[in-house]
Image (tube, rainbow, N blue to C red):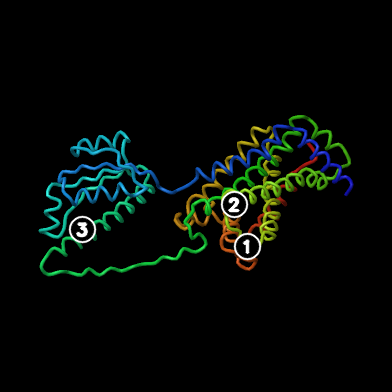
Amino acid sequence: MRTILFIIQKEFKQIFRDKSMLRLIFILPILQLLILSNAATFDVKNIRISFIDSDNSISSRVLKDKFNANSYFSVTKELTNPKEGLDFLQKGSTDIVIEIPNQFEKMLQNEKKAELQIQINAIDAATAGVQNVYVSQIVQQVNQDIAVKIYNTTENQIILSRIETIPSFWYNNTLNYKTFMVPGILVLLVTMLTLFLSAMNIVREKELGTLEQINVTPIKKYQFIIGKLFPFWVLGLIILSVGLVISKVVFNVPMLGSILLVYGFTSIYLLLILGFGLYISNHTETQQQAMFIAWFFMVIFILMSGLFTPIESMPKWAQNITLLNPIRYFVEFIRMVLLKGAGLKEVLPNLAAILIFAILINGLAVWSYKKTN
């Protein structure tokens, strides 16, 4: 036990002696959480929209005024013909072009229907889909207002029936996207830092030549591994604590569940990540190699974690692959506990999966570490 404590003491001294590592551990996560949580959003705002109004009637002006009054839209320019609208789309000067045909109001009065041509820049299909929904909702509102006005001017008044819906938003009643993203980004930061630091730690000893000196000492393998990884386990919990404080103070993320449960789950999760970092370091000779391999796995883990893309929207084969992704279980866990107030019973499958992975990965890491060159 004394040997392990001496190694831990040595590691902490080495960490706090390196000023660049201190900045990486403490300053970088804070900046990333503050920046990424504001930048990583799927909210579609400031939609640039242009009109080709060939009618210039009261109804067409009502339609344009409705878009002008909506905070999500920004009317860029009144265009004169379809060719100019296509040029605007191709140049990226606008996102949507709505063409109001000639005799638009007359067709509404006489035929009780009219058509609008809506062209949307769909390079980003997800954004285009959201924009289409926004446009359709406003057009429907204008359609109802105009229909009521037209029907009320006729001799036989027609009463339009409307279905009123009252949605109830659970767990995020303000529909604040940061409430959804901040816990996931916190998981990402804890994972990245602990993985990279642990992966490069032993490799750095190889590069400096100190690992050979340690290997010829009576220090046992388990003593060396515990002593080397324990400081980063503590640092991972510190990063989590700082992130939770920022999430609550800056972003007002609700924390409905048990914080002790969050720390308990994270403690096991960090064992898994540190074991994975150790396994990488055992099979690399330089810090650059360790960084490249760690990044290779991190990119896959992030994209298939459900952090940015819902797992339910992935193909079935991709959903099956995500079952091997540890970040997926942590992201699900922290959102369930913090936002839904889930207890141990609800998150037990996630905890069991992480525990099994931790045992397997650490077993492989310890087995692959050799005290010989």
Residue tagged 1: 257
Q: Amino acid at mark 2?
A: Ile
Nearest to the observer: residue 351 or residue 91: 91
Q: Earlier in the sequence, mark 1 or mark 3?
A: 3
Question: Residue at 17% across / 50% down in the picture?
Answer: 58
Question: Which circle, 1 or 3, is nearer the viewer?
Answer: 3
> Which quadrant of the figure contains the C terminus?
top right
Q: Earlier in the sequence, mark 1 or mark 2?
A: 1
Gap between marks 1 and 3 measured at Cα: 49 Å
**SS at badge 3:** helix
Q: Amino acid at mark 1?
A: Gly
Q: Position of residue 8 (x, y in %)?
A: 82, 43
| 12 lies above or below 147 | above
**SS at badge 2:** helix
Nearest to the observer: residue 52 or residue 335: 52
- The residue at the far top in this view is 208
Residue tagged 3: 146
Residue tagged 2: 327
Q: Position of residue 248 (x, y in %)?
A: 61, 52
Gap between marks 1 and 2 measured at Cα: 20 Å
Q: Position of residue 366 (x, y in %)?
A: 75, 48
Side of 8 where 254 appears, left or right: left
Q: Where on the picture, by quarter, is residue 3? A: top right
Question: Which circle, 1 or 2, is nearer the viewer?
Answer: 1
